[in-house]
Amino acid sequence: MAILLGCDSVELEFPTKHIFDDVTLGVNEGDRIGIVGRNGDGKSTLLSVLAGELEPDDGRVTHRRGVTVGLLGQKDALDDNATVHHAVVGDAPEYEWASSPRVRSVLDGLIADVEWEGKVGELSGGQRRRVDLARLLIGDYDVLMLDEPTNHLDIRTINWLAAHLKTRWAAGVGALLVVTHDRWFLDEVCTSMWEVHDGRVDPFEGGYSAYILQRVERDRLAAAAEDRRRNMARKELAWLSRGAQARSTKPKFRVEAARALIADVPPVRNELELKRLAVSRLGKQVIDVIDATAGYSDEETGAFRPVVSDATWLIGAGDRFGLLGENGAGKSTLLQVIQGKLAPVRGRVKIGATVRFGILSQQLDELAPYMDQTIREVLSHYKRLYIVDGKETSPEKLLERLGFTTQQLWSRIGDLSGGQRRRLSLLLTILDEPNVLILDEPGNDLDTDMLAIVEDLLDGWPGTLILVTHDRYLMERVTDSQYAIIDGRLRHVAGGVDEYLRLVAAAHDGTEGAARAGRTAAAAASAAESSGAGPQPSGLSNAERQRLRREVSSLERKMESRRAKLEELEAALTQIDPTDYTALVAKQAEIDAERAEIDELETAWLEASEQLEG
């Protein structure tokens, strides 16, 4: 099997940490490698070294002559002022990319809903990630290196990406290296794994599940060896304890051997284990959502725009539900209805008298007031002792079990990494002793080992759990049943994520077909214009009419997005303390600016529509 690239005896050290120590690796034709490890152990750095973007302190990196490497970083280098068109295909003639089946497949799979001539700087985080992915995937590379490619992607897009990577090359051709915390994705696309830890890279055969099995077996063998050593240590200790006089006559080498056996006995307790905490008592009545329709009213026209219609969801004590839906489908709106923060315009919501919510938001808004405080200062707001499995323990000890060191307890919240903030916020949510736990993307920024710890914690959660996540593995691991919002309707998906994907794929067939037809028409119009095709009876050429249609469609989407943002701002205004005049004035200024932007978009839309109809 031909080698494409590799490294030999690579060493790398940063000012505060030793990253790699004598690492030797090879990437062969046909390899599909998943890279896992704790945050900060060097996974992204390994990709940069192998791609040739970072020079090691010692050792060498070699590429076979002519090998092309495509690298997707966690942050893109897209130009905010460039159009999506230029960011993806550059200056390539339209007939070249429009005639390529692979390019069309990538565009339809990733950015069918993104305005082709829109500006990159106006895209959301998820749209921008998909544009960057499309830019990379339309290229013809021998090796693809992807760093957290599933970040900001919904389950449908993650499913498409996995299918694309599995069929991108023929068997035994090309190579893929992917760093991700999405374990379903690793299992789906990878045939081998690299574990980065303690300056080393250990290879494993098979996908993520096979890697975990091998790790368990490795740990089992290590535990068996440790048991044998402890048995020997007990015998030696018994031998050493037979009286001071007898001990003085024992051979010196036996005494030294016995002491060596017990010198490095590891602690018997797993410091990362966090067992069940108490929750507030939960009565029989929890949450009943019955025929509820919720949404927002247009400020200008007063027209009501439903986001979720006729939703019925009966949530009982101990239920473990997952909520699925694409970005913007209405999951956040439904969660607000469930919490009683948003009243439905039709139907009703009944929340039990004993319900006590614990909320972990995607943006970690719960930590915002504490950014200038240390972890210890934040923990001082909570009880000093909690009961965990019948034993008293402190919040500091619980946090240490979630991977924090004693020294880190003195760190400011604002200085913590994303993963550390999420772990801290999750623990603080649980320390409030809620009985209904609502988690919005709890797995963001966590490595696979820490995700497993969080899953163990949620496995022992005795209350009601509602989970929103694009991590399919996490969803299927900790929930018993899934619901989905599709086209504004809440429905139970008895077949789980697979059934949801089938339903969403069917709903998207029409949309993607229209987008595909639009791009094909654009290419045809461009060709007709270049060949001298005359204007239409309305006075517009094919290319001009196509441009106006795209502009009208783009303006409609922008107005829809702006109106949704305006509704969010207006909802936030109602939550502000009426006596806080500074906050009220600032929020009203944001609302006025948003309305002005909508007015400008509506004027542009009207002008473009009139040109198209004229």
Image (cartoon, rainbow, N blue to C red):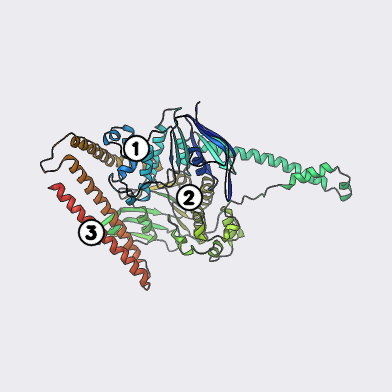
Q: Nearer the viewer, mark 2 or mark 3?
A: 3
* Drawn side of residue 449 relative to residue 235, left or right: left
Which secondary structure, mark 1?
Answer: helix
* Mark 1, other Cα within 10 Å: few <14 / some 14–19 / many ≥20: many
Residue 256 disc label? none
In 3D space, how far apart are the residues under numbered discs 1 and 3 (Cα atoms)?
Answer: 35 Å
For the residues labelled 1 and 2, say whether their Cβ atoms are less than 8 Å apart.
no
- Give above or below for 54 relative to 589: above
Amino acid type shown at disc 2: Asp
Query: Which residue has dot 3 on it?
Result: 599
Residue 81 in the image, given as x and y percentages of width and height: 32, 49
In 3D space, how far apart are the residues under numbered discs 1 and 2 (Cα atoms)?
Answer: 27 Å
For the residues labelled 1 and 3, say whether their Cβ atoms are less than 8 Å apart.
no
Q: Residue at x 26, y 56 (%)?
A: 305
Query: Which residue has dot 1 on it?
Result: 106
Query: Which residue has dot 2 on it?
Result: 445
